[in-house]
């Protein structure tokens, strides 16, 4: 199984990156997890020519090649960081690699609530018609107090939290297999439609 | 009421922008709505804090000053656009201007349900503790099917929609009033003591000590030794005073020195925090402002001068020397204008002094070249002088045939070089060169200006004769001390100690005239909304040029193929051409307005010269955004500027570790900081460097390989660069982004040799004089480095002398 884990922040030090690195190591027998970074992407600015910046193409190719995507998002002001939103806007506006792609959302934050509000927003965003990702239902993985959550070797210090992640990850692998069976072969068709909001309102709304 | 409207997207075309513009217009009788755009807001990044950048600071300040904020948000992927999220993150990280601020949310989008999901997210975001805005509940204004909602004039078409918007907006005005009452600040108490903190100034850190008692800020001391003298002095006097007087941190930054102002404010905030109090509470405490009835000040004086820069203070000093009264009105809080920014040396031919210095290689060659100029290309009015100069040069060369010789100079050489240096042709094929009588006046009297300044108290370096950048010849008299500030310090000291009055923060807005059309005073807008009426026998305009007024530059430009809307400037932001408007308001004629000077190698963000790796031109390697060289790096300022404009303005100076060592402007620590801030790029290979700046690595590598080969051969078949020093070969490599910035305006009010302002009929306007960059005619198509200072001190004196002789000391007829 080949997965890509996207670090949901452009900050140089991030506990969400640490969480993905932990998963990469820890699940090495079950899957190869490549880490995808959004930091190199420019800020989304709705260019009229819809040109794809090279850095966006790199991320998009990583997603395209993967069987599933893990988003590890921090919470900034009760939502996802602008940098992650910007990366998603690029993908939705240009290459749209997330269509029908199985997605798992995890999140680390320094507060006690984890990233519940950001995860809810991210879910709603990924379900928007121009993204249409298949976000795994019923599973939310929050890592609170994330600055204290890892030991020096990068392992989760809290055994319960580690177990919870194991269970969630297995569920995700099962989810990927399941979706592979049920997603129709019309993926191709959908992808080739250039979605646009103006089109929706001009006829099919 | 004053509201800020934020266009919640950075897209070029936005219905939300249209909606805000409609509201701005439609509600103009109820409230003033200032619209802010997100176009230039960088993506929030915790590892690259830009809270102190001018842009984020301006958002912060404007929101703090407003009575409420209206956010017009589209919906992107069922949520708010990243651009909007990004500014909110900036305004919730180190700064919190939205805390307690009344906010109204509106939104336009394509689909029928408008931007409902985005608005819900936005409400949740604005409610987060770092933001803590007070969002108006209910009254959701969602404009669906936005593409059909507006007419050609940008007005909402459907009456019902307008009525609903009206009712939402009226509620918001009420809401903002109620929230304001809620926000009346709490009492603040401190752990008493003296706190050592650092403020971030323009040039680095400023150590401060702040003394607090139980309930008051008692004292603020700042170590200012690292700041550029002159520019920020007023900050150190005034900001601490305002903070202490008002016991508030809600004091306004000083125009032209906002970075240092905010540094001081933040420093005090840090101390307040260390003393256990919440600085935000102090930021909300508005100093009681006297906005009552407009005060009118009426002043009568002999001469009134507009602008306290070099020309203005010179004129004022000259008036005082003859025992008359003078008033100087100055728009900015600090005196000095562009003159404090100048490099320092002023040009004046002083052969007696210059002859003591040895000639240097190349100078004889320059002289020989002058003698070889075809006389047919010399304007007739300059021909006699040109011939006389040729004779001088021929004599000198003969006399020094077998020896190195001394440094030659003469008034004639200065005059002819000023003439040749200013000769240009614009895009319409219109040639221009300096007006003979004015250039003669300048070059004949420049040396007297040096001597006069010495008497006023400006000391010059006798040991060194310098060639200011772009000056062509070594005739620079360099003041001792702090560059341009040395002149201002001397002049300001003289003016204030001899009874002259300088009113800062007083901007002249209109000239007054007698029925016969003689100028007899002016009306200015003073500090705290006062109106200043000045009656005078003569008015001298010395308000500088208009290089900080992009619109005006674009309007008159006939020389550059284009001037970008977002072009930066090396000038003080005060240089908006006010004096030119004042003059044309009473019929003045203008000359040479199409010609402006650019500084080709300026910082793309700030216009400053001294960032990045700036090296001597023999070590410059300039490449465009495609990674290719595009010009002979030895070209004149004009050539480099036009080539940059032709290549999309932004270009890079490429350097390696050895070239870096020849930089004259920087230290390793500064470079490291700029690399960290993302304003300078560094990599161990050219390929990585190219990637960082989105350049084709193969193109850059090829360019550098070729450049190095040309340096080896001493010949550049592509652009004919003829002097090389170092190659680009030792890692790490640097790329310094550069763009041309506006630097000087040669055009301006038409004057004669007596500094009288001339009207469009060619007649003198009685009572009105002009000196300095506000006047045109001398430098024509290109000003030589160091000539502007000669100009302002010479014509500043001439303007005062004419005014005294004609209007002040003569008995009334
Ligand atoms: C970075 C830089 C470096 C330079 N280096 C050199 C150099 O090395 N050599 C050289 O010869 N030249 C140099 N120049 C050019 C030179 O400094 C200026 O041309 C010169 O100082 C202009 O002097 P001034 O007295 O005409 O105007 P300024 O010194 O600019 O003064 C004008 C004053 O008028 C005030 N003012 C404007 N409008 C109003 C109003 N409505 N009411 C009241 N006051 C008003 C302004 O606030 C300002 O204080 C440089 C310029 C810059 C920007
Ligand atoms: C602008 C900003 C806003 C934030 N808002 C929230 C928030 O609303 N809720 C929360 O739990 N943490 C918030 N945080 C704290 C982050 O959760 C914390 O920085 C976390 O470590 C980010 O994840 P990372 O380690 O992967 O960067 C905010 C941080 C920043 C910089």
Image (cartoon, rainbow, N blue to C red):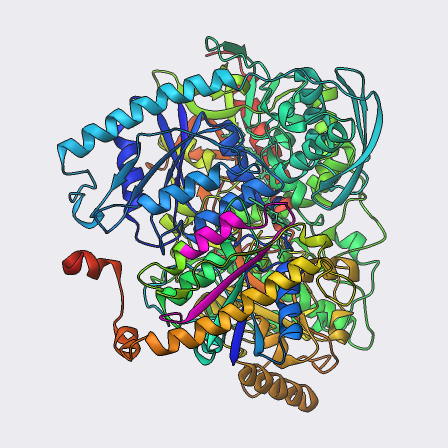
Q: Nearer the viewer, residue B79 or B754?
A: B79
The tally of labels here is 0
Res B206 → quadrant = top right
Res B359 → quadrant = bottom right
B563 lies above or below B810: below
Q: Horizontally, is B443 left or right of B26 in the view?
A: right
B57 lies above or below A26: above
| A115 inside magenta stretch | yes
Q: Horizontally, is B186 left or right of B694 in the view?
A: right
Q: Nearer the viewer, residue B557 or B739?
A: B739
Q: Horizontally, is B780 left or right of A156 in the view?
A: left
| A30 inside magenta stretch | no
Q: Is residue B331 visible?
A: yes
- Which image quadrant: the N terminus of chain B? top left
B280 lies above or below B323: below
Where does the image place residue B669, in percent across and percent down from the top left? 78, 59
Where does the image place residue A76, in percent across and percent down from the top left? 55, 48
Q: Which residue is at 36% across, 59% downward?
A: A127
Q: Which residue is at 34% across, 50% downward?
A: B75
Q: Nearer the viewer, residue B572 or B302?
A: B572
Q: Which residue is at 37% across, 65% downward?
A: A92
Where does the image place residue B783, in percent across and percent down from the top left? 56, 54
Q: Is residue B574 visible?
A: no
Where does the image place residue B799, in percent across and percent down from the top left? 56, 31
Q: Which region of the structure is painted magenta? A: A98-123
């Amino acid at each position: 199984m080949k997965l890509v884990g996207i670090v949901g922040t452009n900050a140089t030090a991030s506990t969400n990156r640490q969480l993905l690195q932990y998963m990469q190591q820890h699940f090495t027998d079950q899957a190869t997890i490549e880490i995808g970074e959004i930091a190199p992407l420019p800020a989304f600015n709705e260019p009229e020519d819809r040109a794809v910046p090279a850095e966006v193409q790199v991320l998009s190719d990583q997603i395209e090649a993967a069987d599933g995507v893990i988003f590890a998002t921090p919470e900034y002001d009760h939502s996802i960081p602008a940098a992650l939103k910007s990366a998603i806007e690029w993908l939705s506006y240009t290459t749209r690699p997330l269509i029908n792609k199985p997605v798992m959302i995890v999140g680390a934050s320094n507060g006690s609530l984890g990233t519940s509000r950001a995860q809810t927003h991210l879910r709603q965003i990924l379900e928007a018609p121009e993204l249409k990702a298949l976000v795994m239902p019923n599973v939310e993985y929050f890592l609170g107090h994330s600055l204290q959550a890892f030991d020096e070797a990068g392992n989760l210090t809290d055994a319960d939290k580690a177990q919870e992640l194991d269970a969630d990850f297995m569920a995700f692998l099962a989810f990927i297999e399941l979706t592979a069976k049920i997603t129709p072969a019309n993926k191709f068709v959908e992808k080739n439609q250039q979605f646009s909001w103006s089109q929706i309102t001009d006829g099919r709304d | 009421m004053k509201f800020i409207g934020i266009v919640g997207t950075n897209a070029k075309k936005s219905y939300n922008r249209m909606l805000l513009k409609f509201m701005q217009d439609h509600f103009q009788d109820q409230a003033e709505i200032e619209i802010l755009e997100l176009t230039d807001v960088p993506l929030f990044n915790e590892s690259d804090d830009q809270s102190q950048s001018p842009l984020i600071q301006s958002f912060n300040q404007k929101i703090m000053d407003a009575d409420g904020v209206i956010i017009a948000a589209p919906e992107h992927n069922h949520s708010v656009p990243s651009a909007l999220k990004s500014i909110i993150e900036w305004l919730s990280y180190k700064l919190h201007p939205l805390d307690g601020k009344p906010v109204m949310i509106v939104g336009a989008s394509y689909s029928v349900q408008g931007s409902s999901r985005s608005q819900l997210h936005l409400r949740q975001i604005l409610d987060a503790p770092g933001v803590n805005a007070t969002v108006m509940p209910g009254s959701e204004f969602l404009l669906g099917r936005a593409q059909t909602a507006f007419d050609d004039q940008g007005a909402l078409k459907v009456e019902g929609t307008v009525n609903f918007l009206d009712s939402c907006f009226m509620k918001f005005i009420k809401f903002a009033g109620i929230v304001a009452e809620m926000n009346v600040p709490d009492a603040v108490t401190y752990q008493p003591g003296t706190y050592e903190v650092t403020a971030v100034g323009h040039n680095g850190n400023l150590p401060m000590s702040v003394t607090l008692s139980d309930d008051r800020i008692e004292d603020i001391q700042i170590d200012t030794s690292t700041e550029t003298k002159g520019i920020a002095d007023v900050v150190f006097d005034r900001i601490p005073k305002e903070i202490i007087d008002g016991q508030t941190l809600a004091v306004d930054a000083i125009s032209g020195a906002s970075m240092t102002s905010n540094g001081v404010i933040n420093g005090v905030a840090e101390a307040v925090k260390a003393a256990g109090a919440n600085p935000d509470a102090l930021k909300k405490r508005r100093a009681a402002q006297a906005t009552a009835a407009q005060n009118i000040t009426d002043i009568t004086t002999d001469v009134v001068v507009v602008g306290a820069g070099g020309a203005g203070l010179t004129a004022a000093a000259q008036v005082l020397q003859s025992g008359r009264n003078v008033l100087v009105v100055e728009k900015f809080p600090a005196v000095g204008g562009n003159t404090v920014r100048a490099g320092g040396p002023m040009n004046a031919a002083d052969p007696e002094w210059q002859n003591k210095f040895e000639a240097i290689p190349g100078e004889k060659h320059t002289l020989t070249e002058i003698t070889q100029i075809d006389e047919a290309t010399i304007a007739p009015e300059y021909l006699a002088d040109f011939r006389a100069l040729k004779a001088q040069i021929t004599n000198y060369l003969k006399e020094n045939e077998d020896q190195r010789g001394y440094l030659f100079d003469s008034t004639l050489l200065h005059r002819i070089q000023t003439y040749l240096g200013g000769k240009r042709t614009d895009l319409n094929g219109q040639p221009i060169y300096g007006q003979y009588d004015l250039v003669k006046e300048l070059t004949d009297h420049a040396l007297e200006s040096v001597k006069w300044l010495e008497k006023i108290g400006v000391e010059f370096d006798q040991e060194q004769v310098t060639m200011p950048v772009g000056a062509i010849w070594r005739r620079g008299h360099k003041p001792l001390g702090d560059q341009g500030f040395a002149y201002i310090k001397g002049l300001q000291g003289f003016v204030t100690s001899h009874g002259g009055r300088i009113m800062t923060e007083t901007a002249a807005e209109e000239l007054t005239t007698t029925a016969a059309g003689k100028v007899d005073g002016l009306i200015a807008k003073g500090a705290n909304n006062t109106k200043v009426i000045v009656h005078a026998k003569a008015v001298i305009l010395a308000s500088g040029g208009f290089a900080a007024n992009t619109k005006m530059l674009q309007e008159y430009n006939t020389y550059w193929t284009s001037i970008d809307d977002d072009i930066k400037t090396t000038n003080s932001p005060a240089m908006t051409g006010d004096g030119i408007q004042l003059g044309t308001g009473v019929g003045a004629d203008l000359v040479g307005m199409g010609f402006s000077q650019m500084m080709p190698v300026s910082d793309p963000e700030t216009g400053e010269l001294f960032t990045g790796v700036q090296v001597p031109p023999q070590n410059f390697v300039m490449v465009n955004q495609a990674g290719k060289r595009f010009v002979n790096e030895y070209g004149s300022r004009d050539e480099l500027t036009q080539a940059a404009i032709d290549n999309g303005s932004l270009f890079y100076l490429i350097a390696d570790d050895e070239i870096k060592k020849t930089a004259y402007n920087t230290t390793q620590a500064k470079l490291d900081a700029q690399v960290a801030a993302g304003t300078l790029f560094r990599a161990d290979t050219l390929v990585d460097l190219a990637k960082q700046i989105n350049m084709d690595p193969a193109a850059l590598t090829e360019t550098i390989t070729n450049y190095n080969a040309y340096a080896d051969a001493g010949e550049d078949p592509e652009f004919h660069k003829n002097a090389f020093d170092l190659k680009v070969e030792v890692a790490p490599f640097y790329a310094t982004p550069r763009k041309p910035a506006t630097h000087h305006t040669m055009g301006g009010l038409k004057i004669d040799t007596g500094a009288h302002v001339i009207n469009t009929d060619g007649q003198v306007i009685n009572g009105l004089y002009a000196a300095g960059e506000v006047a045109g005619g001398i430098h024509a198509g290109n000003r030589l480095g160091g000539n502007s200072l000669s100009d302002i001190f010479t014509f500043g004196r001439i303007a005062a002398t004419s005014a005294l002789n004609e209007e002040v000391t003569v008995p009334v007829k």
